[in-house]
Amino acid sequence: MNTTHHYNRRDFMKIAGTAAAGLAFSSFPTSAFAAGKRDKELNILCWEGYNSDNVLNPFRKMHKGLSLKAESGTDDPSMINKLRAGEIKVWDLINLNQCWARQQMWGEKLIKPIDKKRFEPYIEKMMPMFYNKTMGINPFALSPDGKELIGMMQRFGPMNFVINTKKISIKAAEEAGLPLFLDPKMKGKYGLLAWDNWNVMHMCLTAGFSPYKMHTPAEVELFKKTAQTLFANAKMISGDPAQLNQALINGEIDAIYSGGTYTCSVARKEGFSEVYHISPLKGPLEGGKGSLQWFEVTSVVNNPDVSPLAEDFLEYVQRPDICHTVAMADASHNPVTQMSQPEVFSKFKKEELNCFQWETLEADMTRSVDYQVVPDNDLLTSIYNEAKRTREG
Amino acid sequence: MSVRTPKKTREFGPGFFGALASSPFGLLMLFGFVAPLLCVVWFGFMPPKTFELLQVPTLQNYEVIFNQTYFKSILWSLGLAAVTVAILLVICYPLAFALAKIFKGGASFVTYAIATSLFVSENIRLFGWVIGFMKNGVVGGTLAKLLGVQVDSLLYNVPVIILGMVYVYLPFMLFPLTLGVKMVPDQVREAAFDLGANRWQVFKKIDLPLSMPGVLIGSLLVFVLSVGAISEAKILGGQKVVTIASDIESEFTYAQNWPLGSALSTLFIALTAIVVFFALGRFDLEKLLGKKSNE
């Protein structure tokens, strides 16, 4: 019996060709061959937290053989751009701040409605600002005509600015609000968190008018001067809250312009309770308010071949243990809308509640207005970028 | 007697097989490099704030660029890259000389040590510098402890951005330079010394001209990489300056203005290409590499 082969070039080409074809087939994404059968695949585009293994692994165990991919974004518009760029066929769920689902993605048909009957019982148990009998479901989770449920709400928090309480008193900061940063004494004593969307809104508030309207030329000019002053007087600018918190703790800066319980919770959890988020007492927003707040809405992407597990995942994160896991995810700690339920609330330890300033959270949220899309954002962002580029300090 | 002529078969010359062999690379370049680049160039002519490629072309984005202060970011990027190249040439030439001519077995160790730094993500290495230079960090804390000297933060200024760039791009200058210096024949240097040249004359007349391919390739590599640098200005510089790469990123993300981002990218690619081709035009690489004789 001949056990040896003498390979010639033709044999080699045949084998190489077969191997290459085999490799090519095996490396194709499963979706390419399983069109219409994506019951073993789920792709989530989200803010960090939902992509951590302690959130995802229990769901993986529930669905053996599931390919569950979660990618964290760094800002809302970039994540929406992914869908616009054709990734609508890739993702099943998208998790963004409240305004984007209703004000952009719904209109552009990037997301689809979710089963109202299935999820309404969960929403009815949420905290009063997300569901109450007078208002019903918070409008940001509904389509503009109020008929369709377009996502589920979970993490939330106020977002204004952060101080070191060893350097600035909470009371003084709450009284002064964002104009505190225009005080000449603050020159070189604060860092600027380069989350441009938030900064544009906060700079409007600092200048003394609401961001959520079309602005007059005089207001635009005032916005420009405010932006120039804030950039010129900032000691540092960073897109990384951890870097700014570190500077706040080691005394390089006394405050952070744009920040929330979201950005300071990890430092507070580590014991640096002097890192403190401030919700201003008053300001130019409706009802004389001066504070902004966000909450996330997770929507089902209008994927032509959406995974049947997309809504299952939305239901899974309503479980009390998973609510706690989502709230205490690695990169940031945040309250969740389900904390009105005793079985969820009881899972939080005292220091966990303290890290997102639970004691004052209700008061903070009461004096806050929802994060919305700014009508003349293009103009203001352009001025903002110009001020950053021509920064002199 | 009849002569049998061989049956005429279609002949494939070496050119055909060469083209066939290079086709995978050609296709990769076409679809992976040329096509996306053309998309970016074309997108720069689409109306601002749109996401469709098939619209009536416009010059609006370029008007915005020329009416605003993007030139500052471009100048910062070009300036920082030029300074980085200059500093790295001064730092790396002696080290390259030592690696090529002086260190024997030690050269491999130094090479591996420097190359190993590339295995760690650039951002992580830069955050290492942040820990070193921040207020009460490794440098400040050590000085305070040992000498009682209080040092404020050394971060968030232009020199620290340049330091970061020099550190990150050092291997990209060092290795081509080392190869360049290795090309200098020892006999030529020895002959120059025998004929009475001093060290400076040998460097100027022998070492530098003959190692010029390494100098040129290292400089171009570092320039092209550092002109698009973004992390150093952000992490170490606290965005003390805004580079053009940062502006482009901003347009593609927060501003949601892909056409403006594309126009900025196109303009910047064109500017970088002009600088690079100008530099290449000054030196004949073929001649420097000895593939072309002096005419």
Image: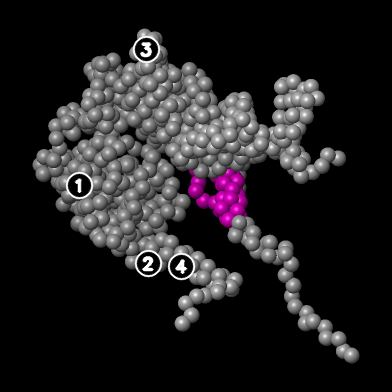
At a point 56% along the width and 50% down the height, the residue shown is B36
From mark 3 to mark 4, how far is it between C-alphas?
Answer: 64 Å
Which range is magenta? B28-54
Disc 3 designates what residue? B146
Could you tell me the amino acid type at mark 2? Ala
Upstream in sequence: badge 4 or badge 2: 4
Write down the chain letter for disc 1.
A
Disc 4 designates what residue? A22
How crowded is the residue under tag 3: few (<14 C-alpha within 10 Å), some, or many (20+)?
few
Upstream in sequence: badge 4 or badge 1: 4
**Could you tell me which secondary element the residue under label 2 belongs to?**
loop
At a point 46% along the width and 64% down the height, the residue shown is A23
Q: Are marks 4 and 2 on the same chain?
A: yes
From mark 4 to mark 2, how far is it between C-alphas?
Answer: 17 Å
Q: Looking at the picture, tell me which residue is in the foreground, B214 or A306.
A: B214
Q: Are marks 4 and 1 on the same chain?
A: yes
At a point 32% along the width and 58% down the height, the residue shown is A67
Place of residue B85 in the rendered image (x, y in percent of width and height, measured from the top left): 61, 29
Nearest-to-viewer mark from 3 and 2: 3
The reply to whether discs 4 and 1 touch (Cβ–Cβ < 8 Å) is no
Q: Looking at the picture, tell me which residue is in the foreground, B19 or B185.
A: B185
Kindly give the residue lying farthest to the top in the view shown: B148
Q: Is residue B232 visible?
A: yes
Q: Looking at the picture, tell me which residue is in the foreground, B86 or A147.
A: B86
Could you tell me the amino acid type at mark 3? Leu
From mark 3 to mark 1, how far is it between C-alphas?
Answer: 50 Å
Disc 2 designates what residue? A34
How crowded is the residue under tag 4: few (<14 C-alpha within 10 Å), some, or many (20+)?
few
Could you tell me the amino acid type at mark 4? Gly
**Could you tell me which secondary element the residue under label 3 belongs to?**
helix
